[in-house]
Amino acid sequence: MKKALIIALLLSASSGHAQDVHFSQFFLSPLFQNPAHTGQFDADYRFVFNQRTQWRSITEPYNTWALAADAKDVMGKENIHAGILLFRDAAGDSPLRTIRVMPSGAHTFAATDDSTAFITLGLQVGFTQKYLDFSRLRFDNQYNGQVFDPSAATGESFSNDKSTYLDANIGATVKHELSRDIFYTAGMALFHVNRPKESFLNDAAVKLDQRFVIHGIGTYRFDRTWSALPAVQFQMQGKYRELIVGGMVRRSIIEKYGLKRALYVGAFGRTRDAAYLVTALDYDQWKVGVSYDINLSDLKTASRSRGGFEFSVAYIMNYFKSVYEEHRFCPDFL
């Protein structure tokens, strides 16, 4: 099983059909989902951390984390936003490591005269590096018929153990307040706009497929206590397609005098892959989310239906303490 996964990993890394990592809590990984989310929150600064562990029951676990920081208005310019996304992923026995450093910028402008709708355009430009430790891999030529000899020649030839390239992503979002109790955010993004070369074999023809994302999340307030938050995300990259559909219910515990505390529970499904449960908590400037994937794909026999555990935490802060406003036009998870 491990050998099969390693072979698949190597083939995907050298054939140009690799698939980007995903987070189940896409609603709590804003700069990872769309660069146009930069600066889209009700405060001055925001910090978000996401961590995901997957396939622990099959082989070496896949470990992924992302750290993002962004500012709502920068250099005294209203509706000009800036941020940065740091991303690291380690996959498989080697492991294949991916590191991304992606600064982002965005601009928001009103789409209606009554300021009930806003459009934001965003851009990310940065660097990605992938690294593969060949010394931790085992090849057929290193078996002499009786034992494994790590000093034996592998019989394989790789040009590089690193692949570094410039990467660029673009996106747009719209926020629309339909009424005092109904509002939504929808958007689209295109990743790897420049289709960078990604190969350990120094093959210029191998380029990273672009990834297209459409997403949306809404809020419907039944009363001052209960709200429903339906959410959807669709992605396609090369031959791969991914659709996530689900929602959460929010129960407000307290929301007055500058305090904001609420509990969320929800369920989501990822087509032909997994179902997962989500619980989250608002505690004033903090938001914490936890989810667990239940594997439903063809790999469920080997994985024993165990998918991935994911943890997210976000913190927003104001440079100056603001006066609490009872009615705010901002979706609960963005």
Image: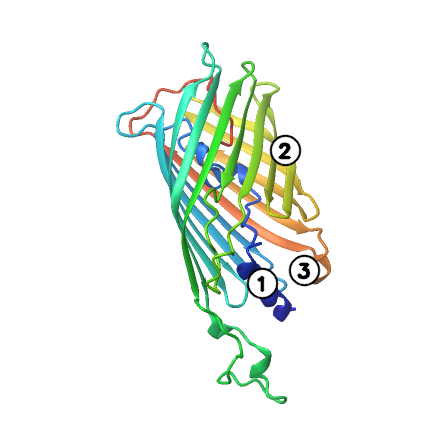
The residue carrying mark 1 is 11
The residue carrying mark 3 is 303
Precedes in sequence: disc 3 or disc 1:
1
142 above or below 28?
below
Label 2 to label 3, Cα distance in Å?
Answer: 26 Å
Label 3 to label 1, Cα distance in Å?
Answer: 22 Å
Of circles 2 and 1, which is in front?
A: 1
Amino acid beneath label 1: Leu
Asked whether disc 2 touches disc 1, contact meaning CB atoms under 8 Å apart, the reply is: no
Q: Residue at the spot x=30%, y=30% of the render?
A: 74
Of helix, strand and loop, which one carries label 2?
Answer: strand
Q: Residues within 10 Å of mark 1 (few under 14, many from 20)?
A: few
The residue carrying mark 2 is 247
Left or right: 236, with 286 as reference point: right
Asked if residue 324 can be seen in this view, the reply is yes
Q: Residue at the spot x=58%, y=63% of the render?
A: 11
Q: Position of residue 265 (x, y in %)?
A: 61, 36
Q: Position of residue 316 (x, y in %)?
A: 39, 34
Q: Quadrant of residue 325?
A: top left
Q: Which is more toward the observer, 195 or 21?
A: 195
